[in-house]
Every structure is written in C-alpha cells, then in structure tokens.
Image: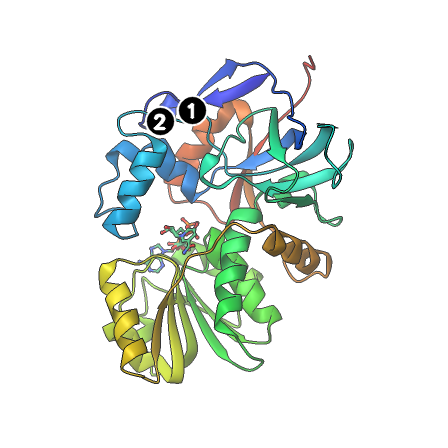
Amino acid sequence: MKTVVYTEYGPPDVLRLEEVEKPTPKDNEILIRVYATSANYGDIVARDFRHISPRQFNMPFLFWLLAKLSFGLSKPKNPILGSELAGEVESTGKDVKLFKPGDQVFGYRGQSMGAYTEYLCMPEDGVVSVKPTNMGYEEAAVVPSGGMTALHLLKGIGIQRGHKVLINGASGGIGSHAVQIARDLGAEVTGVCGTPRVDFVKSLGADKVIDYTQEDFTQSGETYDLIFDILGRSSWSRCKGSLKPNGCYLLASFKMKQLAQMLWTSITGSSKKVVCALSPQSVEDLHSLKELIEAGKIKSIIDRSFPLEQAAEAHRYVESGQKMGQVVLTVAHDNEN
Ligand SMILES: NC(=O)c1ccc[n+]([C@@H]2O[C@H](COP(=O)([O-])OP(=O)(O)OC[C@H]3O[C@@H](n4cnc5c(N)ncnc54)[C@H](OP(=O)(O)O)[C@@H]3O)[C@@H](O)[C@H]2O)c1
C-alpha cells in the first residue's frame, strides 16, 4: 500500500511516497481504509521538529523536551505523519464488538500519528467513532484534532448563554471549531484573525471579527467573559483590562510564565482568572462532536484538497500562510492489493 513517509526532519521535500506492507489488525483492532487525512499544525511541527527551538515551541520547556523525546532526537522515530483521519472499516480483529466492516469512521491518533497512508489499525477503544452522517470523508477528517481541543477546553470553562467570548486565533484548526462551539452555547462571539481570513471567520458564525493587523482588541474598550487565546500571542497584562469581573483568560498555548499567572490568580482569589489547559484525547469528545455536527452546529470548511501523493505540496501550502480553512489529503484506492 502507498504511504507518505519521512525519515529525516526538514522542509516539505522530506515527505516521500513509499510502498509499505498493509497492516493486519490485532484481536482488539479495526483495520481502517483511510480516505482522508489532513495537513494540520501538528503535522507541520512534527515534520521539522529538529529545527523547532524551545522558544519557538508554544509550550513550556518540559513539554518541548517530552515532544523531542517522543518524536525522536535527530530523526523521526515514527516515519508517518497524520494525526486525524476518516475512512471505512475494512476488517476487524476477532474480539472487536463496537465496529463492523463497512462502518464509516473518523478518528484521532494524537502523537502516534500514522494517517498518511492507505490503511491503518486502531484499537476499537481508541479515539475513533462512527462518522457524522451529514459529512463526507474530507470534511470529517479535519474535525478531530481542532474540534476535540476546542470542545474540551470550552466545556471546562462553563460558557453561559449571553456570555461575551473572544477567540484569538479564530481562523485556525482549534479556533474555527471554538467559534462554532461557543456560538452553539449561546455566547456572543468575537473572532480575531489576520486580514485574509476575516470573511472566513464571519462565515463560521462569529458575531464580530477583529483583524489583528489593524486593531488591538485589548484597546477597544470592549470587555469579555472569556478571552480564549489559541497561540498565546496576547498577554495577561494586556488582556485583564478587557475581562469582565469573574472573566477568564484561557490559553491553549502557554509557557511557565502563564502557568505562574494561573497559580497566582488562583491562590490570591482574584475575580479574573488565568487558565492554562490541556485537552486529553477522549472518544467521548469525539462522540459529542459527531452529535454537534449532525445537529448542524459545526461545519468544516475545506480550503484545498491534495492527493496523498502531493503531501509535500499540501505542507508547502499550509506553510505559505494562505489557507482559509482546512487542508485535506485525500487517499485514492485504485490499486487494491
Ligand atoms: N492545550 C491543548 O491541549 C492543545 C492541543 C493542541 C494544540 N495546542 C496548541 O494550539 C496551537 C495550534 O493551534 P491551531 O491548531 O489552531 O493552529 P493553526 O491552525 O495554525 O491556527 C493558528 C491561528 O493563530 C492565528 N494567529 C497567528 N498569529 C496571530 C497573532 N499574532 N495574533 C492572533 N492570532 C494569530 C492564526 O490567524 P491567521 O492565520 O488568520 O493569521 C490562526 O487562526 C499550538 O500552539 C499548539 O501547541 C494546544
């Protein structure tokens, strides 16, 4: 079967097509025929992790070190990228009860990745669920990574109807889902993004969109119940004046400084809180996303699709900073073996 591999860190050209052996599911595993996967933030970072310094990494040094050990010090340990996917169950191990051949599924592989391929195995109790009925494979494949993170972090905050929520980084994988989930929870949502993506964020349902190249949202005089910063490009010192009493500054990317601010606002009983949060990989969140999608609350907007063979081109496109929505890799199965 064809698979895109990388055996050294570097630019998109390190991705190359290879023939590898089709896997066989263990007793508790399902074999998935992959139809679509994505080129997302995690794939781009993992592909060139050797050149990502602790400073460039949007998380504390310890997280960088753990990622370095997990991805591989001088060359990638796991040669196949792709953290999210959609496809069809081809066969199942003898103990599998939750899925049967022919089920259309979508799933998340996290740091173990491996979806840039025609077939892969996942344990039936992994982060895999039946695909939403109202989405095709391409649309479903770009939901799990950003969708689960947005859902999990927003759930933990307890947004209420009428709350004012600002999402800084609203046009990315996490932010585009956060806008839609916060809207569904009844919040009034302001999205912040760069100039080319203003209309894209509006199309996600944001009530208002701020272009960060034109306006500093912390200087507008508006106040919010929640400021959710995806990349951690803002700062607590600038944002606290833009929070309502009891408001929350939620960070998906943070350093030790923000962790210390979280501790400080917690122990001093400050009415405005800093929250640095991690999203675990949970199949329950994937099931919740499926329900939200089927209820018409979340949609995927695909900017461009590339065949798997053009994974390098897809990575180049993402890195060019032009994307408006998600970038998909489609996997054709014309040479069945
Ligand atoms: N906490 C967790 O559990 C968790 C889980 C997964 C990932 N993460 C973190 O999430 C981040 C990746 O998020 P993602 O997948 O959504 O990335 P992404 O798809 O690359 O999107 C990044 C977003 O940030 C925006 N942005 C860039 N520069 C900005 C600035 N100066 N001010 C405001 N917004 C800016 C971009 O806007 P434009 O493109 O419009 O400029 C885009 O909307 C990483 O830092 C990763 O470590 C955290």
Neighbor class of circle 2 (other Cα within 10 Å; few <14, some 14-19, many 20+) is many
Please say whether residue 219 is visible from this viewpoint.
no
Image spot of residue 161 (x, y percent): 58, 80
Residue 236 found in image quarter: bottom left
Viewer-nearest residue: 271 or 142? 271
- Where 227 sits versus 203, above or below? below
- Where 287 sits versus 241, above or below? above
Image spot of residue 245 (x, y percent): 38, 87
Q: Secondary structure at mark 1?
A: loop
Which part of the image, by quadrant, shows the N terminus?
A: top right
Image spot of residue 302 (x, y percent): 57, 45
Horizontally, residue 4 falls left or right of residue 194, namely: right
Residue type marked 2: Pro
Please say whether residue 28 is visible from this viewpoint.
yes
The reply to whether callout 2 and callout 1 are in contact (CB within 8 Å) is yes
Residue 7 found in image quarter: top left
Residue corresponding to mark 2: 76
Horizontally, residue 49 falls left or right of residue 130, namely: left
Q: Secondary structure at mark 2?
A: loop
Residue corresponding to mark 1: 79
Q: Residue at x 26, y 57 (%)?
A: 255
Viewer-nearest residue: 225 or 197? 225
Horizontally, residue 151 falls left or right of residue 58, namely: right
Q: Residue at x 50, y 38 (%)?
A: 83
Find the distance from the CA under tag 2 to the CA under tag 1.
6 Å
Q: Residue at x 47, y 35 (%)?
A: 112
Image spot of residue 43 (x, y percent): 42, 37
